[in-house]
Amino acid sequence: MSAVELLFVSKEQIESLELQPEEILETVEQGVIAHGKGEVVMPPKTHLPIDYPNSLFNILKGYVKPINVSGVKVLGDFHDNYKHQLPSELALTILHRTETGAPFAIIDATMTTWMRTGAITALGAKILARKDSKVLGHIGARGTSWYNVRFLNKIFDFEEIRVTSRRPESSERFADILSKELKKKITVTQTTRDCVRDADIIIDASRLTHHQILVEDRWVKPGCLIQAYGAILSIAPSLPFSVDKLVVDDWLQCKGSEFGQLASLIKDGKLRDEHVFGEHGEIAAGLKPGRESDVERILFWHKGYAISDIMMADLVYRKAREKGVGTPLVQYANPQDI
């Protein structure tokens, strides 16, 4: 019997790879297109609530045919981790060889989750926002928020970037660091209204623990793209019905979960199949149109799916192998282990 060799790649080792935005966007986009073409197997993510306030585990799993890789991500979503100086999301992704089921990589998925979420946000805007979008209004300053703004800035020439968050110290630090990195002024606003009103692109990456409206329908101007992916409804309940298009990442997953931005509207029977224009992958694959006019208001709800996690983990694994980064692990080194 052959030994099973795995490579563990930590957050610090991922940082040392210096992955470029362009290769991250290209990698995640390949997964989105594969999803749109039906070249994946992806059961809906599983939520595991635990007896601890504002906390749960998410289990995401799938198979991506174009790269012939299967994977599982387990993510702990603990809203109050900032009190322990920890990210609110801590995760690992395990990749498996499809031919044998043997695991071959264990990848820190805290950073790759931030990256893939930022990539999905930017790729969604690429086909759903106005090409001449100049004003970005961003709610939230958590881990994924950094990559939302970084990757969006690669696609759009913003003249104004606004940010607000529940904890002012987070948004101030966010604005200070990113304004220097991007060489653009980032304005911290005191209210969500000031952040999103008349913006061309609105991103709601909030971390609510209870229902609260952060984005009113009347603040979303004609031609605006709004993206929302928090676990609790934070946009006006009228928006999914008043916009010109509602786009989701994976409708089966969205409507099969008790958690998610629009989950309460689905549970109440208000949001149904006929309200959804299409999935991100269908549009990315050219099977459905994206933005069709400069006055369309479009809402994109991405709940997050395993395909982008697997694509990101595979990219990290390949880059780590190329650069000799990571910690080798061995299972079944001796035949008698079986």
Image: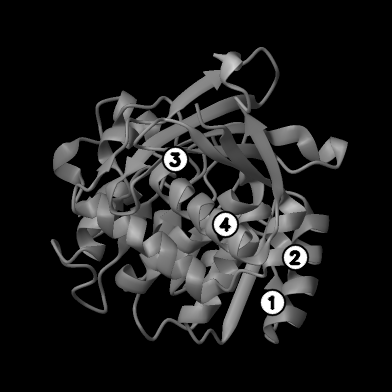
- Tell me which residue sits at (68%, 37%) in the image: 329
Q: Which mark is residue 261?
A: 3
Answer with mark 2 or mark 4, whichever residue precedes in sequence: 2
Q: Is mark 2 in CB contact (under 8 Å) with mark 1?
A: yes
Instruction: Name the N-terminal-most of marks 4 and 3.
Output: 3
Q: Is residue 90 visible?
A: yes
Which mark is in front, 4 or 1? 4
Residue sitting at x 30%, y 43%: 250
Which one is earlier in the sequence, the residue at label 2 or at label 1? Answer: 2
Asked where in the image residue 78 lies, by quadrant, the reply is top right
Question: Mark 3 and mark 1 in contact (Cβ < 8 Å)?
Answer: no
Foreground residue among 192 and 126: 126
Q: Residues within 10 Å of mark 3 (few under 14, many from 20)?
A: many
Q: How is the image coloured?
A: one colour
Going by the numbered disc 4, the residue's amino acid type is: Val
Residue plotted at (54% across, 50% down): 214
Instruction: Classify the position of the C terminus by image quarter.
Output: top right
Q: What whole-number distance in Å separates the C-alpha atoms at marks 2 and 3?
A: 24 Å
**Mark 3 is on which residue type?**
Gln
Question: Which numbered circle lies on residue 186?
Answer: 1
| Of callouts 4 and 1, the N-terminal one | 1
Q: Secondary structure at mark 2?
A: helix
